[in-house]
Image (spheres, coloured by chain):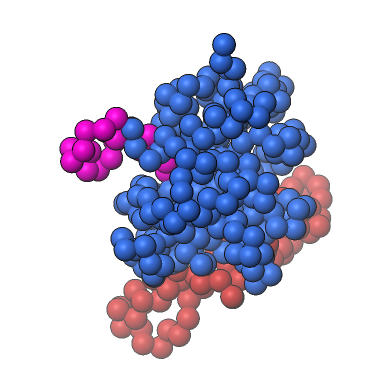
C-alpha cells in the first residue's frame, strides 16, 4: 500500500477570502498575535500500488487548477 | 419547413439548472434534450448529433475539489476530442455559472493561446460569501453569436447565485489578450453603467469580468443565469411590466437563429 498526503492551497498571489474570514474571527476572539491565515485542503489517498508521481498526476488531472493552486504531494 | 435545432443540455449529479435551460431552449423554437454525461461517456449518445451544447448551473459533483473540476476532468478523460471537434466545427457552446466554471476548467475559454490550456480559474468570491442577487452588466457583443440580440454598450440585468465566481487569469498576458481582443463580453457595472467595485462586482473578478467568449465567438461562459429569466414572470420585479419575455431569451434565440442561418 502507498499512502499519499496531497495538500492543495491557493497560491500566495491569490487572495484567500476564507483565510481572511478566519483571520478576522481569530482576532475577534482576542488573538491579536495572528498575522495571516491561509486555508487549503488535504487529501489522504491510499493506493494499492504507485508512487509520488501518481499523486502528481492527480494534482494535474483533478485536484488543482494550476492558475490558482499549489499542490504538494507527500508520501 | 424550419430546420430542427437539437440542443444537448449536459447534466450530472449536482447540476440544477437543466430544467430552466430546457424550457428556455424549448420556448426558443428548438428541440432540447437533457443528457446525462454518462450517455456521452458510454456512447449511447453522440455529441455530433446535436447542434448546440449547454452546460447548466448548479453544483456538479457537489462542487467537491473545486467548482466544475470533477465534471471537467470526466469530460477531458472521455469525450475531450468530441467536444473539441464540436467547438472547432463552430457550433454554439454555452455555460452559465457552474457551466462557466466547467468551460474554464476545460480550457475552452478564454483560450487566447489556441491550445485549450487552462488559462484562468473561477476562485472563491472575494467577499467569502455566497452571492445571490441581481447584477447589472455591460454588453460588448463583439462576434459572440449568443449576443446577436444585444447592442454594444447595452446595460442588462441578470440574476447571479455563486460562491466561486472570481475570474482570475493565469497571468497579465492572458488578461491583456482578453481585453485587447474583446473576449470580456460581459462586465459587472453599477446601475449607472460604470465599472465599480463591490457590491456591483459581486465576486472581485479581475477587470469586472462576468462573461467570456472565445475568439471565434461560439463558446460563451457567463457567471449569471440567463436561463432563470427567460420569461418576465420569473423576474424579481415581474409585476411592474407585463411583457412575456425577458433578457434571458435573447441568448437562446440567438444561438438557435445562428444554427438555422449557418447550418
Q: Residue B263 location in percent, x, y? A: 67, 26
Locate the N terminus of chain B by quadrant.
top right
- B182 shown above or below B227: below
Closer to the camera, B222 or A67?
B222
Q: Position of residue B126 (x, y in %)?
A: 43, 67
Residue B39, image x and y in percent?
A: 64, 23
B70 left or right of B82 in image: left
Q: Is residue B63 visible?
A: no
Q: Nearer the viewer, residue A64 or B75?
A: B75
In the image: residue B242, left or right of residue B142 = left
The colour one sees for chain B in the rendered image is blue
Q: Which residues are magenta?
A: B225-244
Instruction: Give the residue drawn at x 61%, y 38%.
Output: B93
Asked if residue B234 is among those painted magenta in the image, a careful observer would answer: yes
Task: Tell me the colour chain A is drawn in.
Answer: red
Q: Quadrant of the rendered structure where residue A21 is?
A: bottom left
Of B204 and B246, which appears nearest the observer? B246
Please tell me whether residue B32 belongs to the stretch shown in magenta.
no
- Residue sticking out furthest to the left: B239
Majority secondary structure in the magenta region: loop
- Say which residue appears at 68% left-offset and 46% top-offset: B216
Seen at 41% across and 67% down, the residue is B195
Q: Nearer the viewer, residue B23 or B17?
A: B23
Is residue B236 something that shows in the picture?
yes
Residue B246, compared with residue A52, is above or below; it is: above
Amino acid at each position: 500500500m502507498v499512502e499519499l498526503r496531497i495538500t492543495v492551497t491557493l497560491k500566495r498571489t491569490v487572495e484567500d477570502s476564507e483565510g481572511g474570514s478566519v483571520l478576522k474571527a481569530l482576532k475577534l476572539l482576542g488573538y491579536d498575535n495572528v498575522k495571516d491565515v491561509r486555508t487549503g485542503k488535504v487529501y489522504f489517498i491510499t493506493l494499492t500500488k504507485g508512487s509520488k508521481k501518481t499523486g502528481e498526476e492527480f494534482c494535474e488531472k483533478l485536484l488543482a487548477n494550476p492558475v490558482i493552486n499549489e499542490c504538494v504531494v507527500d508520501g | 419547413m424550419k430546420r430542427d435545432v437539437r440542443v444537448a443540455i449536459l447534466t450530472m449529479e449536482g447540476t440544477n439548472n437543466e430544467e430552466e435551460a430546457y424550457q428556455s431552449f424549448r420556448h426558443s423554437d428548438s428541440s432540447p434534450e437533457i443528457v446525462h454525461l454518462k450517455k456521452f461517456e458510454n456512447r449511447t449518445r453522440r455529441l455530433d448529433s446535436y447542434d448546440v451544447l449547454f452546460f447548466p448551473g448548479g453544483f456538479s459533483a457537489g462542487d467537491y475539489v473545486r467548482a466544475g473540476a470533477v465534471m471537467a476532468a470526466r469530460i477531458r478523460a472521455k469525450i475531450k476530442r468530441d467536444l473539441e471537434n464540436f467547438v472547432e466545427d463552430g457550433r454554439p457552446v454555452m455555460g452559465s455559472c457552474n457551466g462557466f466554471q466547467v468551460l474554464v476548467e476545460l480550457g475552452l475559454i478564454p483560450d487566447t493561446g489556441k491550445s485549450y490550456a487552462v488559462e484562468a480559474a473561477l476562485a472563491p468570491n472575494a467577499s467569502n460569501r455566497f452571492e445571490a442577487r441581481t447584477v447589472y452588466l455591460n454588453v460588448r457583443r463583439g462576434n459572440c453569436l449568443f449576443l446577436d440580440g444585444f447592442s454594444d454598450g447595452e446595460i442588462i440585468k441578470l440574476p447571479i447565485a455563486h460562491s466561486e465566481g472570481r475570474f482570475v487569469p493565469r497571468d497579465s498576458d492572458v488578461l491583456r489578450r482578453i481585453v485587447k481582443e474583446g473576449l470580456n463580453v460581459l462586465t459587472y457595472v453599477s446601475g449607472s453603467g460604470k465599472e465599480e467595485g463591490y457590491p456591483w462586482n459581486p465576486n472581485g473578478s479581475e477587470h469586472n469580468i462576468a462573461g467570456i467568449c472565445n475568439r471565434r465567438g461560439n463558446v460563451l461562459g457567463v457567471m449569471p443565469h440567463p436561463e432563470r429569466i427567460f420569461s418576465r414572470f420569473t423576474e424579481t420585479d415581474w409585476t411592474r411590466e407585463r411583457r412575456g419575455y425577458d433578457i434571458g431569451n435573447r441568448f437562446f434565440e440567438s444561438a438557435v437563429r445562428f444554427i438555422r442561418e449557418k447550418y
